[in-house]
Image (tube, helix red, strand yellow):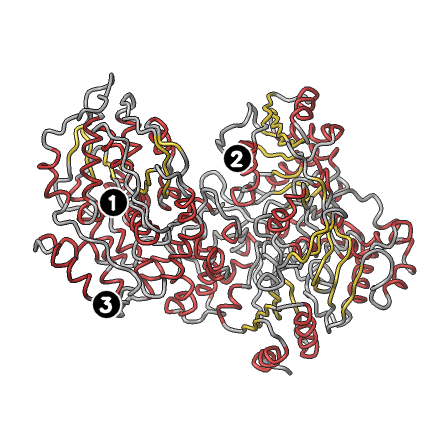
């Protein structure tokens, strides 16, 4: 029998692409976006079709199964397996060519859908199927699952849009299939011709979302034109590996409009959906209040239909004909995107039920004929209640396809038994309405066991014979669709210990928004993945490695694991995942916990003592009045433990608190506009964070001037305070708790409003403080008292008029501001001050200690190059540069040659009658 080592050596000798049988590579592929987990023997990233053939030939000779994998967003377990996983995203990801006149594109299987759509948009074309994972799912995965998406009412499923496929079978044989018998494997024609009656009767009554099983097998009937490529779609990697596809493109409407229709409840919306199809909409999407949870911009109602039309006129005609409680028509594209984002994030937000409980896939996408949807949903809700379960249905109401995450207990034996019993009852309910167990995502392991209930034993036997013609050795993705594993086997939760940290890690459901290839926009997650493109540097990849570390089967060194340490090393701690991940994974906190345990009882890296202890070091230097000497020394020597590729920021000659009274005495309200009418002056406490105190006191002095000009009385904490951020980011959690307890004692039980200028410190106080000291009521009190500079002005000086600067603005929104604090107050304040334009999204790349640590400089610079530096280059010459985070200002100065300033500084300039100092522009 071939050993894993022998197999790895043979594959390395035969392939030009990557071959990795290491623990980290295997751990990253144990799960997809489903409830299931299987440990592969190794991972291969083929460079081309020849590599795919070689891998399939070698694996067949060794008797090792193969699982093709794209973006890993499959929800039924079909992208996991125990053999060799073919990662088709690394190299086989090209758009080979586009023929706009013929409306065709030739693609490789690892091409992300949005890359195809972006490439053909200039021709006024698009690829019709568009699942909500369009920013990271691949064309090969879409073909494997016969993916659909919101626009399938107009443009059909993936199978409807595939013309030809190049397929390599287990063993290495190549097939080119389209329409007709050319390229078919030996015996397929005879199988079909011997089962014509069964194909015509056993698969009769189909509708557009009949995706389950080999649902397209009847496309091989002579009267349907023997559509080999169509029949192959939806085979979930069980027949062969697609190495190239010719896909059809459709015309993109130049000015689509979105009609959002409000209904009293979900049933009313479901009953109405089928009636809207006569208006030939592009989409008919539905969701209810229990999923939306306060999203803005929706009309009155308890449930909504999102109906896209080709133009605004069609949308208004549809609204007039719809029997809706309320409606709104949206023609503006930005406003449409904001509303669609609610729908696209539903796969993640549906995972978090009201109250914080988690819900899981498993019965994610059943479908019934659209006219049956209302009745089906009513019975579905009753079935949930009967089993004591909860879930929030949503999805493609115009095609009768419903997505739902359910709060299954997939850990205890009783919970797993309930999961199985519910699944059985659910299958019977779907079949009773003439539906399909899968309407979009495939059956995988989650539903394949129940296919006989839908098709009957004879058709399922035919499915087995179809697979055997393509894959006689049974090496392609065994256990899926044909001769499947039980639906309650291989559950991913079974491997985890019972702990709070394990429950946090299990939150990652694998929808992989962190793998999005989108550039631009306000999002942050995941900066290091966007630079390296490696799964281990995505939020999902890191969560998977932590999962496997806790499971102990693949990653066996526990908290001392070098694989996990290496993956987390490039996590910037930006907290972008906390807001941008649909399920709120907080990798920065997970990293802190890992580092805390990883280095327990050991000497840490020097950076953990230098940068990690920055508040103590800077306080000592200030006490010795040694800032000048420290600056001179830093210019001459390399500080051990830090990168040689960066210069250290200069320390201020005097700390902010030392000069506070002298600088602000007599400043009063200044010559700028007064506070206007309102309540009596309120006392606020200005937080002297480490950066403002020792490195940028000018921001503190400016804030005092502006706050006083707005009519507020500004004080400082009575004792020494610190948010503990640098200790958190280096995983020194015990030290962070000590610092925070001392801080709480200095602040007291009733701190009043606390204005924090540094976004990272404000975020640490608001979220990390109560998490680290959950039993101290003072922690919640201080967290609730924290306000950003803009929030304080908006809340406590609402009538104050800021000075008019009337300038364009560029710069950076801090990652922690985006993820934890929000920037609505900042936007309003800039608008009132006449600062026009948007700050950059993404991450500056410095991220506190990250950019100063050895080995991080290249990634740090690449993060800045994605959005921040291009935004500075594109800014008007007279633009002021704003960055409230000290790290952001430092990165901008060191890489952009521009002086960025805190918003408080810009407004303070305006108090003197100035219009803000433009950034001094050097080479960017």
Residue 188, image x, y percentages: 85, 64
Find numbered disc 1 in the image and state the secondary structure of the residue it sits on.
loop
Residue 712, image x, y percentages: 20, 27
Find numbered disc 3 in the image and state the secondary structure of the residue it sits on.
loop
Vertical position of residue 312 compared to residue 243: above or below = above
Residue at 26% x, 32% y: name it: 907
Residue 12, image x, y percentages: 59, 78
Q: How far, Cα to Cα, is label 2 from label 3?
A: 47 Å
Position of residue 387 in the picture relative to residue 920 (left or right): right
Front in this rendered view, residue 7 or 384: 7
Q: How far, Cα to Cα, is label 3 from label 1?
A: 37 Å
How packed is label 1: few (under 14 Cα within 10 Å), some, or many (20 or more)? Answer: few
Residue 463, image x, y percentages: 79, 59
Residue at 77% x, 41% y: name it: 434
Residue assigned mark 3: 640
Which numbered dot is residue 338?
2
Residue 785 shows in this picture: no
How packed is label 3: few (under 14 Cα within 10 Å), some, or many (20 or more)? Answer: few
Q: Earlier in the sequence, mark 3 or mark 1?
A: 3
Which marked residue is nearer to the observer: mark 2 or mark 1? 2
Residue at 41% x, 71% y: name it: 557
């Amino acid at each position: 029998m071939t050993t894993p080592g022998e197999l790895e050596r043979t594959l390395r000798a035969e392939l030009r692409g990557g071959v990795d049988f290491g623990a980290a590579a295997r751990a990253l592929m144990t799960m997809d976006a489903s409830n299931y987990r299987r440990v592969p023997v190794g991972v291969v990233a083929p460079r081309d079709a020849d590599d795919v053939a070689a891998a399939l030939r070698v694996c067949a000779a060794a008797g090792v199964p193969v699982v093709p994998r794209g973006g890993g967003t499959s929800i039924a377990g079909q992208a996991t397996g125990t053999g060799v996983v073919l990662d088709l995203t690394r190299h086989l990801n090209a758009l080979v060519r586009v023929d706009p006149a013929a409306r065709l594109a030739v693609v490789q299987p690892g091409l992300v859908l949005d890359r195809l759509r972006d490439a053909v948009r200039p021709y006024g074309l698009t690829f019709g199927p568009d699942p909500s994972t369009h920013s990271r799912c691949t064309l090969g995965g879409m073909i494997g699952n016969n993916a659909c998406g919101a626009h399938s009412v107009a443009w059909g499923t993936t199978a409807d849009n595939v013309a030809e496929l190049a397929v390599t079978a287990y063993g290495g044989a190549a097939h080119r299939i389209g329409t007709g018998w050319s390229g078919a494997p030996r015996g397929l024609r005879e199988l079909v011709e011997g089962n014509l009656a069964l194909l015509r009767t056993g698969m009769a009554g189909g509708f557009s979302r009949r995706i389950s099983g080999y649902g397209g097998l009847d496309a091989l009937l002579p009267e349907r034109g023997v559509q080999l490529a169509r029949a192959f779609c939806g085979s979930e990697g069980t027949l062969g590996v697609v190495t190239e596809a010719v896909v059809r493109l459709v015309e993109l409407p130049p000015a689509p409009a979105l009609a959002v229709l409000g209904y009293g409840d979900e049933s009313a919306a479901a009953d109405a959906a089928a009636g809207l199809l006569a208006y030939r909409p592009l989409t008919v999407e539905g969701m209810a209040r229990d999923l939306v949870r306060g999203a803005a911009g929706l009309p009155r109602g308890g449930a909504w239909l999102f109906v896209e039309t080709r133009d605004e006129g069609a949308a208004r005609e549809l609204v007039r004909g719809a029997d809706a409680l309320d409606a709104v028509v949206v023609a503006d594209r930005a406003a449409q995107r904001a509303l669609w984002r609610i729908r696209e994030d539903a796969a993640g937000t549906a995972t978090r039920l009201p109250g914080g409980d988690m819900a899981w896939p498993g019965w994610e996408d059943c479908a019934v004929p659209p006219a049956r949807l209302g009745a089906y949903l009513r019975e579905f809700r009753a079935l949930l209640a009967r089993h004591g379960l909860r879930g929030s249905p949503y999805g493609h109401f115009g095609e009768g396809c419903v997505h739902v995450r359910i709060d299954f207990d997939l850990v205890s034996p009783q919970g797993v038994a309930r999961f199985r019993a519910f699944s059985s009852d659910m299958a019977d309910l779907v079949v009773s309405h003439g539906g399909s167990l899968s309407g979009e995502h495939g059956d995988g392991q989650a539903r394949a066991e129940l296919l006989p209930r839908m098709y009957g034993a004879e058709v399922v036997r035919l499915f087995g014979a179809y697979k055997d013609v393509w894959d006689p050795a049974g090496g392609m993705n065994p256990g899926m669709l044909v001769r499947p594993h039980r639906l309650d086997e291989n559950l991913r939760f079974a491997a985890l210990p019972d702990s709070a940290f394990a429950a946090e890690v299990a939150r990652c459901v694998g929808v992989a928004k962190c793998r999005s290839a989108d550039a631009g926009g306000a999002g942050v997650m995941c900066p290091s993945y966007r630079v390296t493109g490696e799964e281990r540097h995505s939020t999902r990849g890191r969560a998977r490695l932590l999962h496997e570390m806790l499971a102990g089967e693949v990653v066996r060194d526990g908290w001392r694991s070098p694989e996990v340490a290496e993956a987390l090393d490039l996590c910037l701690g930006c907290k972008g995942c906390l807001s941008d991940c649909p399920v709120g994974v907080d990798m920065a906190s997970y990293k802190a916990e890992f580092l805390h345990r990883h280095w327990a009882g050991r000497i840490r890296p020097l950076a953990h003592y230098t940068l990690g202890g920055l508040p103590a070091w800077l306080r000592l230097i200030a006490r010795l009045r040694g800032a000048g000497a420290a600056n001179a020394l830093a210019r001459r020597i390399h500080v051990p433990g830090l990168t040689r590729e960066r210069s250290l920021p200069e320390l201020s000659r005097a700390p902010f608190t030392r000069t506070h009274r002298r600088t602000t005495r007599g400043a009063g309200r200044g010559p700028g506009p007064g506070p206007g009418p309102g309540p009596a002056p309120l006392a606020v406490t200005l937080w002297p964070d480490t950066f403002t105190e020792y490195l940028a006191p000018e921001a503190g002095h400016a804030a005092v001037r502006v706050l006083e000009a707005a009519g507020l009385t500004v004080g400082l904490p009575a004792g020494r305070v610190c948010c503990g951020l640098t200790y958190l980011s280096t995983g020194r959690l015990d030290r962070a708790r000590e610092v925070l307890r001392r801080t709480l004692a200095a602040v007291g039980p009733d701190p009043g409003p606390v204005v924090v200028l540094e976004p990272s410190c404000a975020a640490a106080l608001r979220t990390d403080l109560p998490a680290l000291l959950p039993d101290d009521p003072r922690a919640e009190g201080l967290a609730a008292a924290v306000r950003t500079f803009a929030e304080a002005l908006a809340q406590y000086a609402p009538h104050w008029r800021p000075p008019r600067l009337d300038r364009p603005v560029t710069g950076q929104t801090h990652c922690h501001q985006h993820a934890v604090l929000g920037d609505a107050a900042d936007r309003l304040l800039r608008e009132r001050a006449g600062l026009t334009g948007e700050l950059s999204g993404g991450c500056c790349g410095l991220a506190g200690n990250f950019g100063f640590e050895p080995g991080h400089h290249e990634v740090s610079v690449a993060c800045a190059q994605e959005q921040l530096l291009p935004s500075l280059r594109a800014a008007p010459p007279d633009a002021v540069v704003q960055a409230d985070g000290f790290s952001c200002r430092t990165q901008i100065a060191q890489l952009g040659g521009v002086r960025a300033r805190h918003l408080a500084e810009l407004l303070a300039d305006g108090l003197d009658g100035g219009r803000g100092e433009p950034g001094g522009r050097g080479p960017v």
